[in-house]
Image: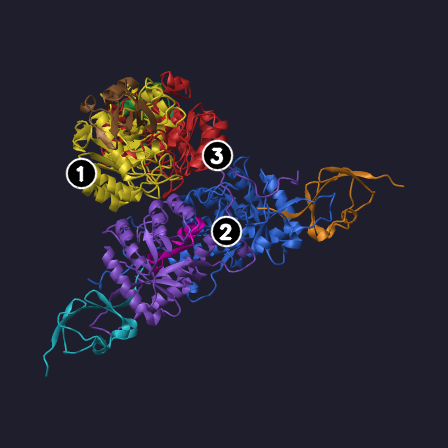
Chain colours: A green, B orange, C cyan, D brown, E red, F yellow, G blue, H purple
Amino acid sequence: MGQTIQIAINGEARGVEPGATIAGLLATLGLDTRKVAVERNAEIVPRSTYASQALSPGDQLEIVHFIGGG
Amino acid sequence: MGQTIQIAINGEARGVEPGATIAGLLATLGLDTRKVAVERNAEIVPRSTYASQALSPGDQLEIVHFIGGG
Amino acid sequence: MGQTIQIAINGEARGVEPGATIAGLLATLGLDTRKVAVERNAEIVPRSTYASQALSPGDQLEIVHFIGGG
Amino acid sequence: MGQTIQIAINGEARGVEPGATIAGLLATLGLDTRKVAVERNAEIVPRSTYASQALSPGDQLEIVHFIGGG
Amino acid sequence: MDHVQNTQPDMWEVAGRRFTSRLIVGTGRYKDLPETAAAIEASGAEIVTVAVRRVNLSDPGAPMLQDYVPPNRYTYLPNTAGCHTADEAVRTLRLAREAGGWNLVKLEVLGPPPFLYPDMPGTFEAAAALIKDGFEVMVYCADDPLAAKRLEEMGCVAIMPLGAPIGSGLGVVNPYMIGAIIEHATVPVLVDAGVGTASDAAYAMELGCDAVLMNSAIAHAKNPVLMARAMKAAVEAGRLAHLAGRMPRRTTAAPSSPMAGLIR
Amino acid sequence: MDHVQNTQPDMWEVAGRRFTSRLIVGTGRYKDLPETAAAIEASGAEIVTVAVRRVNLSDPGAPMLQDYVPPNRYTYLPNTAGCHTADEAVRTLRLAREAGGWNLVKLEVLGPPPFLYPDMPGTFEAAAALIKDGFEVMVYCADDPLAAKRLEEMGCVAIMPLGAPIGSGLGVVNPYMIGAIIEHATVPVLVDAGVGTASDAAYAMELGCDAVLMNSAIAHAKNPVLMARAMKAAVEAGRLAHLAGRMPRRTTAAPSSPMAGLIR
Amino acid sequence: MDHVQNTQPDMWEVAGRRFTSRLIVGTGRYKDLPETAAAIEASGAEIVTVAVRRVNLSDPGAPMLQDYVPPNRYTYLPNTAGCHTADEAVRTLRLAREAGGWNLVKLEVLGPPPFLYPDMPGTFEAAAALIKDGFEVMVYCADDPLAAKRLEEMGCVAIMPLGAPIGSGLGVVNPYMIGAIIEHATVPVLVDAGVGTASDAAYAMELGCDAVLMNSAIAHAKNPVLMARAMKAAVEAGRLAHLAGRMPRRTTAAPSSPMAGLIR
Amino acid sequence: MDHVQNTQPDMWEVAGRRFTSRLIVGTGRYKDLPETAAAIEASGAEIVTVAVRRVNLSDPGAPMLQDYVPPNRYTYLPNTAGCHTADEAVRTLRLAREAGGWNLVKLEVLGPPPFLYPDMPGTFEAAAALIKDGFEVMVYCADDPLAAKRLEEMGCVAIMPLGAPIGSGLGVVNPYMIGAIIEHATVPVLVDAGVGTASDAAYAMELGCDAVLMNSAIAHAKNPVLMARAMKAAVEAGRLAHLAGRMPRRTTAAPSSPMAGLIR
C-alpha cells in the first residue's frame, strides 16, 4: 500500500519505502556498514545514527568506500 | 623669524620653513624634479602639483629615483 | 681495329684502346682532370703524368672526387 | 768463516751468509712464507723451491704481500 | 646517526606515529587486487594511500581493497586524488574519516590535465579547513620553499613536494628546491610523485627526505612485485647513504691503492 | 627474470665462479684494518680487490690484511693499481698468483695523475700477456665500446669500464657508452670507478651491469660502515629495478587514482 | 618562421610594444655606472630593469643611472626588488610610474633569503592591485604552470618564471615546467633569474621562451662587457635554433657522409 | 683576453693557418647542393669537411660539390668517413691530397655501426703513416685524455674528441674528459660529433674548445639554413662566455638590486 519516496544515491534516482532508514537502505543494498561512509545532503552521517535516520523525499546520498589509489 | 616645521624625508627628521612647498623643498635639496618621485603620507604627489602643495607639520615624505637594479 | 684491353675502373670492368693514357681515358669519360684524383693499382697517379701513363691490361683504377660529407 | 754476500731486497742492499737460501732468508726476516711471494732477478720463485734456492751475490729480490687496495 | 650505529632502528615519526619503513606506496593502477597485495607486501610499506570513491551499487559484493590490503595491518592514508577544489577535497576526507575512523590524510588539490600540478591556493584553503576540523594533514605541494614553510606553519604534519608530475617518472627534477624545503622544515618532508625507478628513490632519500611516496613507478613497472622489492631496497640505500655522508666529488682522480711499496 | 620470480637466487658468474653479491669492494683507504673488515662485512661483498706491495722489512710482524679479511672467506682479486706499464702489471700479477695461488685478477694499466685514465694500449698488451700466461683477467678500461669488445674477444673474463675517474665520485658520466658496452658484451660488465653514492650504484645496475666495483665511495664516506650497508642495498635495488623493467618516462602527468566514482 | 626566412625581422611584442632584442638585462651589481653603460650597450638590450630607491639626500648631485643609461634610448622596466609584501610592491611601482611616466613594470614579490623565492600569494595580490590601477605587469613567478596561467588570466602582460634562484647561476633547472608554461601561454614567457652562462640562455630560448631576463650572469662575470656580448649572441642562437627545429636525438650513430662510392 | 678587449680579432690557428670562424661544418646529408651551399654560407664556416668517393662514371656531368662550395673560398678538409681500417684511411687521404693539392686532413677511423666509435688503434696507426707522409692531421678520437695526448705527441695538429656518437645529437656527454683533454693540450682541441642544437655548441666552447665541428645538427634540422645561423651565433656566444669567465654557481640566491634605500 505505501508508495515509494524518491531519493538520489551516488547520483542515481532511487525509490525507497517510506520510513526506510539509512541502516535499512544499506542492508537492502547489501553494503557492509563498517566499510562505507554516507553523506546525506552534503552532511556526513555518523555511522552510529544510521538506524535512527529515516530517509526523506529528495535526499541526496553519497555512499563511498576505499579503493586503490595513489 | 618663523620657526621651522618638522617633517620626515626618507625616514629622516627635517625642519622646513612654514609654507614651504614640495617644489621649494626639492629645489632646496638640489634635486631635479624630472628625475624623482615624491610620496606624501603614503600618497603619490603628482609632479604637476609640487608647486602648489605646501608641507604640513608631521608630513612623511618619500623621495625616490631610479638606480641600477636587476 | 685493334682489340681493346681490359681494365677495371672503380670496380667495373672496362675495355680501352691499346695505348690509351690516363689523360685520354679521363677525356673519354668526360671528367675534368682538375677535379678528380686517380689511383692505379693502389698507387697515386700524379696529375702531371696523366698524359704519359699508358694503361696496361688488368690495371685497377680508382677515380675519385670530393662530395659532401661530414 | 765466510764474509757475507751482497744482495738487494725490495731495493735495499743487504748482506746475507754465503749459501743462505730464500727459505732461510724469509725465516731470518721473520716472514710467513704462506703470505708472501718472491721474485728473484725478475723471475717468480715458486714457493716449493724456497728451500733449495741459494742466494747469489747481486741477486735482486722482491718480496711482496697483499695489502688493502682498490 | 648514533642510534643507527648502535643498531637501534632508524625510525621516523609523523603526527605522533612512528614508522620503520620510509616508503609509502599507492594502491592504484595495479592489474588486480591480488597484484596490489603482493606488490605492497614486497614494498615493505607500512602506510598506503587509498582513494575514496562511490560504491558500485550494481555490484555491492565485488571484492574490496580492505580484503586484500587489511587496514589493521597497513595504515590507510586516504587521498583526495581527482579533487580539483578545496570543497571536494574536504568533503572527500570527511567521508574518509567516517569510513575509516582515522584522521591522518593526504591532501592533494590538483590542477587540470595534462600536468595535474598542485593547485596551491586551493591547497592552502583546503589545508586550513581540514586542520580546523581536526585532521592531520600530509600535504602534496609544489617544490616551492615558501609555500612549504607556510603549510608547515599552518599545521600540516608532513610536507610532500612533487619530484616531477604525477605518473611522469622523471625523477627529482629540482633537487635544489627539494633540498631547500628539507633544510628549513621541522616536520617530515617526503618526495611525492615523479619517482620512476630505484635510483630516483635513492636520490630523493640522499637529499635528506624522511620518506618517499610513489605509486606508478611500482604499478607501471613491467614486474610490479620485483620493482616493489627494488624500491624497498632503494629507499633504505638512500637513507643509509644520507646518514653515512657521501664522499666529496672531485673532477680528477685519487688513487684507492697506496703508492708506496710498488715493485721496481 | 623467471628465476627471480620463482625465487631462485639471482646469481652471476665470472670465470666459472658463481656469486650472489653484485658488489665488489676495494680494501684500500680505510682508517685501519678493523674498519676495513667492518666495512667489507657490511657491504656483503664476496670479492674484494687487493694490492700487491713490498713487505715492510723493518716491521715484518705488522698486522696483515689477511688477518682481518680472510682469503678463505672472501675471493681476493689482486689488482695492478700503481702500474703504469704492461710489464709492471704482468710482474705484479705473477707475484700475486704465487702469493695467493689464484689466477683471477683485476688488470688496470693506468695513465699518469691527475686522471689515472686507463692506458688502453698498455692494457691490451698486458691483457694479451696475462691471458697467454693462464690468468683470468677482469679488465679495467675506458668507456670505449670497441676496446671493450676487443678485450672480450682477446679472452678477458669481465669488462670493467670506468663510470668516472678513480676516486672522483662523479657517478656514471656516460650512460650511453656503458649501455653500449653492456648491450654488445657476452661476458660480465661491471662499472669500476666513479661511483660516489648509493644512487650512482643503483643507476649503474639499472643500466644492466652485472656488478659494480668501488672503493672510495665507501672508504671515504664519513661513516664507511653505514655507506657499505647503503651500497649493498643500492646494488640490490638497481639490479631488481633492472629486472623489473622501469615505467616509461613521460613529460606530462598520468593520474594514479581512478577518475570514476568521484563524489559530486 | 616564414617571416624569418624571408628575412623580415623576428620581433616579439609585449603590452603593444615591439622589440627586436630578446634579451632584457638588469642594471645592478656593476662596478660602476660606466661599466653598467658599456655592458648594457654590448648586450644589445632594448629593455633594462631598474630599481626604485630613496634619493641620497646627503649627496644629491651624485651621478645618476639616467645619465649613463638614457631612458630615451632604453625602455626602463622598474622592478620591485626588495619588496616582500604586495603593499610595498604597489607603492614602489606607483612611485616608479610617477618618476618615469610609464606603466610597464616588473613585479616581483620575494620571500626571505636565502632563496628569495617568488611569494606567490603576495604576487597574486600585488598583480591584482596593479592591473586594477592600470599598470602593465610583467610578473616574476615560480615555475608553476597553474600559477602562470592564473597570472595570465588576471591580465599580466608577460609571465616570467625563474630558471633558478636569483643570482644562483644554476641555469634552467626544470625545463619540463618552463616548457609546460610556454606551451599553454598566450602572452610572452621569459625565463627570469638563474641563467649563469651563455649556454643557459641559449637553452632557455630553445625551450621556446620569447625572451630572457638576466643581471648577475653579466654583472658578475669576470669581464661583464664580454659576457654581455656572449649573451646577446646566445639569445639569438637559442631563438634561431628554436625556429629552425633541432635534429632528433638518438642513442646510436648515424653517418654524415655517404656510404656509397667508397674505394676498395 | 687582451686581444679581445682591445678588439683585435679573436682568431685561432691550426697547422699554421689562421681562422676567425670557430665553426667547422660538414657538407653531407643536405637535401641538395644548393641547400648545402646556403647552409654553409649561413654558418660562416671557413673550413668544411668533404668526403672522397668514386666518380659516378655513368653520370660524369652531374653537378659537383666544388661548383656550389668553391674550394677557393672554403678550406676543404677531406675526411675518411666510411674508412674502418688505417689502410683505407691513408689511401683515401692520398687521393684527396692529389685531387685537392692540400695536406690538411681530418682522420677518422671508425668502428662498426651502430656506434661508429673511433677505432683508436687504427687511428694511431693511420695517424703515424699520414704524419710520416707529410700530412697535417686533425684527428677524430675518443674522449680519452691519454690517447689525446699521444696523438698530439705523434704530431697531430688538432685533437677532435667526440662529444657523443656521430649523428646522435646528444651533446657533450662527458664534459669532464673534454675538459681534461683541453687542459693538457698544446694544439687546438675541437669537439667533433654529438652536437645537437645551439646550446650544445655554446657549451662545448664554454669548456674551452678552440672550435666545434658538426654536420647533422645543421643538415638534419627542420630548417638547416636557420640552424646554421644559430650555430654561428652559438659558437661565438660560447667562445665569448669562455673568455668572459662565468659567474660562480651557488645553490642559494643573491639579490641583484641593492637592499639599501628601500621605502618604508
Give the residue number, with chain letter if any, for mark 2.
H243
Q: Are the residues flagged by discs 3 and 2 in contact, CB closer than 8 Å?
A: no
How many numbered dots are placed on residues in this image?
A: 3
- Residue kind at label 1, given as amino acid type: Lys
As drawn, H169 above or below E224:
below
As drawn, F181 above or below G41:
above
Instruction: Select label 1 or label 2 by which is in front.
Output: 1
Magenta run includes residue H200: yes
Q: Chain of mark 3?
A: E
Q: Which residues are magenta?
A: H195-223
Label 2 neighbour load within 10 Å: few <14, some 14-19, many 20+: many
Image location (x, y in percent) of residue D47: 20, 24
Quadrant location of the C terminus of chain F in the rendered image: top left
Q: Are the residues flagged by discs 3 and 1 in contact, CB closer than 8 Å?
A: no
Residue H217 location, quadrant: bottom left
Q: Chain of mark 2?
A: H
Give the residue number, with chain letter if any, for mark 1.
F132
Q: Which mark is residue C56?
A: none
Give the residue number, with chain letter if any, for mark 3.
E145
Residue furthest out toward the bottom: C1
Front residue (pair E105, G251):
G251
